[in-house]
Amino acid sequence: MRLIPPRSGFPLAVAAVAFAFLGLFLVYPLYNVFQASFFDPSGKVLTLANYAKMLGTPFYRAGLVNSLIVGSLATLLTIAIGVPMAFCVARLPVPAKPALLALAALPLVLPSFVGAYAWVLLLGRAGIATQALREVGLDGISIYGKQGLVLVYTLQTFPYVLLPTLAAFKAVDVSIEEAGQNLGATRWRVFRTVTLPVVLPSVLSGGLLVFMETLENFGVPFVLAEDMPVLSVQAYKLFVGEMGANPASAGVLGVLLILCTTSALLLQRYYLSKRRFATGARAVPPELAVAPWLRRLGACFPWGVVLLALVPFAAVVVISFLEFRGPVMHLNPSLGNFALLWQRGERPLVNTIALATAASGAAALLGVPIGYVLTRYRSRLADLLDVVAMAPFAVAGTVLGIGLVISFNSGFLVLTGGWLILVLAYMVRKLPFNVRASAAILHQIDPSLEEASVNLGVSPARTFFRLTVPLMAGGVIGGTILTWVTITSELSATVVLYSGQWSTMTVEMFRALEGTGAGMAAATATVLILATILPLALIYRVLKRHEVALL
Amino acid sequence: MTAIRIAGVARSFGAVAAVRGVSLDIADGEFFTLLGPSGCGKTTLLRMVAGFCELDAGAIHFGDKRIDTVPPHRRNAGMVFQNYAIFPNLTVGGNVAYGLKARGLAAGAIGQRVTKALKLVHLDGYEERMPHQLSGGQLQRVALARCLVIEPEVILLDEPLSNLDAKLRVEMRGEIRQLQKRLGISAIYVTHDQEEAMAISDRIAVMNAGRVEQIGAPAEIYRHPATPFVARFMGVTNLLSGTLARREGARAVVRVGALEFPIEAAAVAGAAEGAEVGFSLRPESLSVAPPGAKPPAGWAALAARIERVEFLGALTRVELRLDGGLGLSAAVVDLPRGLAQGGVSLAYDPARVTAFLGPCA
């Protein structure tokens, strides 16, 4: 609504750069994936033969079905856990809430396949818990297959539902609940007919994130699915297959993946477009007075879920300091695994840090101006930019990786085999997050501050750099570090794109899992967990400090 | 030291016409207020002068200089925002110095002028404070100092007092008016509060639905509203519609139902007998006396019954019902003893009645 300045080339320039970047490194690669799937090998005849072949093969059809079943079950389960959890935290006296919330967000940034691997160490065939259970006569509990995938996804992604739902519960004006009760409805009826519908859009947004994440995830099924076919793993295997790469078949699976994520996204948009609630809570709703047993249950439940989600990570760190002889673990403390890791060279660690730093910095440079244009300029162009900048969100990392390889393996721009293609893939993948984060920060900065600056004689461009950027700095630094953290644990695109010397920690872990180096995999996992937690501890402080400056 | 000329300015947002052809001439050093309900286009008009809103048509001049084509940061029109818009990351001193730094002044000169400006708004010694340590009233003063320190050609105030409590509002409006007169800078002030507008302004433009309904000095607008809208918007009034029954010398008589209201003939000079006429009778121009009391010479008298009395402190509001069922509202300083109910004699000076040709919608 507010335009600074009324006529300016700035949004146009930002949009041009964004369109050019995403056009070249998202749309063009995806176009090539589509083309590979819709044309015969000569590349000239349009055909559905590839689709007919893939969908006619029970193995690949099962992959699609399994992916959808696991994704749906995980989504339902995260909602079933996340919503009551959010309600407990919002409205019941749960002890140590700030600590609970800080810990509850962790599973989202901890590398998911490390989590999956940790569960294998605990409940896998040779897992500690499995052996202990076997001794007491319990056998047949398996972490592999669908149930394992659903369990790991649920524990890994429940914060996607918990966090927005919690915010929504806190934003519900208590007086509307009181009004409901005042009109004669019971507390439960009010919850069902007023509170729940108001928070439902947030629940569904979170659920969508869970669904997308489970569909595109590559590492978790790689560790846990074993023989069970899963779409993202199949696409990868077809593309880098030992029998020779098969871009057409991989392309078909890629297109199917995109179709699933896109339809979920559109379905959610359609649903939300009809439901917009303005909830202007003036105060955080008070905690409910409930019976002691309910209060205890309300405290145990959220803490139980959070601890269950984090215990495997703690376990993997402990295990990495134990002695391994081949795949067999012994209960002796040892630094052997790390020594082994060190022998393989520090290159993957250096690569991970360098690539994540370059990509998160570049993503911020691209994302912040886009976020700025989206929040401060209302126009058709801005709407289009919004859609385009969010598009990477619906594209699985594996598919993007395949597209990039097909596109830049030869021709006018050759990128495969280098580091740049990894940075570009990370930038594309993290752009939606960056744009959303900058937009969120900007929403908290009153536009009249910028108007005041312009009014006092500072040109719009200088206002942006002298006033807006410093005001955004805290939030942008926090967002960039968060991007950095998620890039260090990126696997699905990396595994398609990396080459020899540009291997990362996640790839090392992936390779250790493929081989027999269980001890080294645990050591790698520990390094990855530390790479995630240390920066987060750092921004926790930075964000706290900047909250004050941001009013 | 600049006159402001706004000529034929218009702006639409999509299908909504926010400002439809407004022309205003604001004299050098004048305190001019845009007054109207929310959505009347007053803020849009102010933002056009500041440069934050484009014009679809028309032109704006400061003196001889056309400024609507100048980018907002080169207009030298200081603005005070409704929510203060104090930069939260800068100290009070940093906020006030902001515009001076943009103009490339030497550090020494900036320091002096900042000190002077803060003194002007009674905030001397606050340079090092951070905005979050200040109260709403103090933030408003910082905003004022920050705007005045750049020595703007005009100052633009967008509902600057609406976030303050009632008492502080009255205090601050006095200070703003005083400062503006002392510095002699032309000011455009936007508000929806008619009392505030009357207290602070040299002249007021009452706006409605993107148009100016009336421009004039506060007393003129209050006493002689040009349209029923202005009459209604400027405080409480009794708006009545009837037909012009006859003329009796300097008087004209308007018939409302079975009742007759004498007004000044000059007020309905253009109307033929039998024409529809509306008129506004301010509550405070009605006097309430015991039944049968003789009204002052030249006043018109009506019989009425008291329906309800509201004691408001300084004033007492009396709701009355005339014969024939017509309701009127009167405001008196003191209601004579024993008159809390029952019949009374109502009187008014026909000269205080404002008439409009056509009915009052």
Image (cartoon, rainbow, N blue to C red):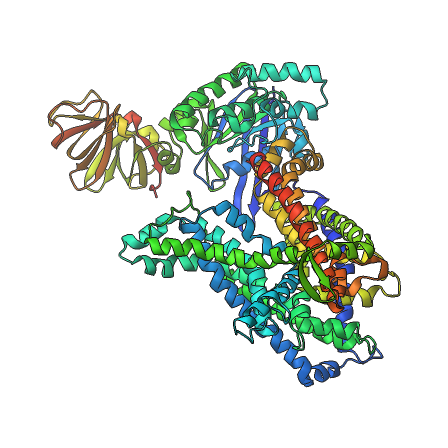
Out of A367 and A275, give the one closest to the viewer: A367
Q: Is residue B306 left or right of residue A255?
A: left
A182 up-or-down from B4: above or below: below
Q: Is residue A200 visible?
A: no
User: Residue shown at 76%/70% (left/top)?
Assistant: A33
A401 up-or-down from B27: above or below: below
Asked where in the image residue A195 lies, by quadrant, the reply is bottom left
User: Residue shown at 71%/54% (left/top)?
Assistant: A334
A358 up-or-down from A510: above or below: above
Q: Residue B206, how many percent across, how many down?
A: 45, 33
Q: Is residue A258 left or right of residue B286?
A: right
Q: Is residue A435 visible?
A: yes
A186 up-or-down from A218: above or below: above
Out of B33 and A503, give the one closest to the viewer: A503
Rendered-image quadrant of the C terminus of chain B: top left
Badge count: 0
Q: Residue A84, how many percent across, how many down?
A: 44, 59
Out of A128 and B334, give the one closest to the viewer: A128
Out of A423 and A273, give the one closest to the viewer: A423
Q: Residue B183, how many percent across, how many down?
A: 56, 16
Rendered-image quadrant of the N terminus of chain B: top right
